[in-house]
Amino acid sequence: MDNGSGSHQVHKDHKSSVCLIPPSVAQGPIQALRKVHDKQINRWPPHINLLYPFVPHNQFPDILAKLTEVGTRVRPFRLSFTEFGYFSHGKNSSTVWLGPDTQPENALQRLEEELVKAFPEFNDLMVRSATFSPHLTVGQFGAKVKAAPLFCFLFGF
């Protein structure tokens, strides 16, 4: 949308993202953790965000061809969750996540790079930190999480 100055104004929607959602056969163990620990379990399915926020829902038909074209440039890959980690948000808040491993290596980073090339105005995840850190959130905790492993958990799809 032109804002009158000749520049394009981008509308971002925090209820929309480009993400990977595990197949339903892999969601049981993830949802069991999220049910206990993730306050967003009813808002979002288990997912790994690639672009967030993204376009409003009513613009999906307009960008579908572009998303499909990006998908044709990315080689298929296998993804497994091989670790737990956490982000600290100060001394009283942490987010615990599952860390993905891909074959070939760094496939999620390459997919995210292709998406950002196609949609450079939606590079928020890359801008927030020095590098894109793909993860699947399983919960939030009110205190800093200890560095010791929280769970023993490994599966893939």
Image (tube, grey):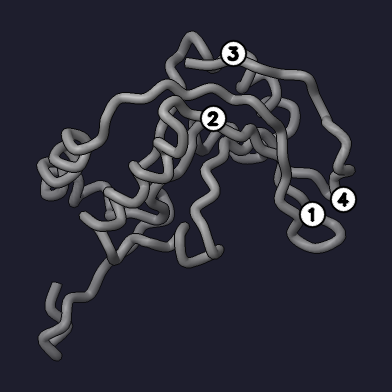
Camera sees residue 40: yes
Return the x and y of residue 29 as percentages of the image width and height.
64, 15
Most foreground residue, 126 or 37: 126
Q: Residue at x 88, y 36 (%)?
A: 148
Please give the label number shown on residue 143. 4
Relative to 114, 106 lies left or right? right
Name the kind of residue labelled 1 in the image.
Answer: Ser
Q: Which residue is mark 2?
A: 101
Relative to 97, 141 lies left or right? right
SS state under label 4: loop
Q: Which residue is mark 1?
A: 93
Crowd around label 1: few <14 · some 14–19 · many ≥20 (10 Å): some
Crowd around label 3: few <14 · some 14–19 · many ≥20 (10 Å): few
Q: Are marks 1 and 4 in contact (CB under 8 Å)?
A: yes
Q: Quarter-wise, where is residue 82 in the image?
A: top right
Which label lies toward us, 4 or 2? 2
SS state under label 3: helix
Crowd around label 4: few <14 · some 14–19 · many ≥20 (10 Å): some
Sequence order check, earlier mark of 3 and 2: 3
